[in-house]
Image (cartoon, grey):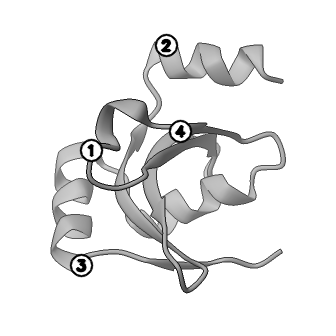
Amino acid sequence: MRRGFTWDEDKGEKNLRDHDVAFDEATEAFYDPNRVELFDEGHSEDEGRYVVIGFSAAGRLLFVSFKPLDNKLIRIIHARVAERKWSKVYEENN
């Protein structure tokens, strides 16, 4: 299933500078057949946010924060290389 993605360009550039992960690469985590998707209770007071943990085509395990939009797009909010605790969540679910 092909998905559509969107993000704020300025936020994407800042994310690349701060975390060395481009949002283009972050979209690849959604196509990992073993990805783990979780509801993000800590950041969902105003809007329902989720995270996906999955591998990019470059072989990096990524942690990506996103919000599904009504028009079937996924808005990327934040992306970084998965920290150890999130790597463990991925391993425990695969």
Going from N to C along the chain, the mark reached first, 2 or 1, is: 1
Badge 3 marks a residue whose secondary structure is helix
Kindly indicate the quadrant of the structure image that contains residue 41: top left
Is 26 situated left or right of 18 in this image? Answer: right
What distance separates the C-alpha of mark 2 from that of mark 1? 17 Å
Badge 4 marks a residue whose secondary structure is strand
Is 68 situated left or right of 14 in this image? Answer: right
Do tag 1 and tag 3 residues touch (Cβ < 8 Å)? no
Residue with the mark numbered 3 = 9
Is the residue marked by circle 2 packed among few (<14), some (14-19), or many (20+) residues within 10 Å? few
What distance separates the C-alpha of mark 4 from that of mark 1? 22 Å
Going from N to C along the chain, the mark reached first, 1 or 3, is: 3
Q: Residue furthest front?
A: 45
Amino acid type, mark 4? Phe
Residue with the mark numbered 1 = 19
Is the residue marked by circle 3 packed among few (<14), some (14-19), or many (20+) residues within 10 Å? few
Residue with the mark numbered 4 = 39
Position of residue 25 relative to residue 34, above or below, is: below
Do tag 4 and tag 1 residues touch (Cβ < 8 Å)? no
Residue with the mark numbered 2 = 85
Number of residue marks:
4
Position of residue 47 relative to residue 41, above or below, is: below
Badge 2 marks a residue whose secondary structure is helix
Q: Nearest to the eye among marks 1 and 3: give it.
A: 3
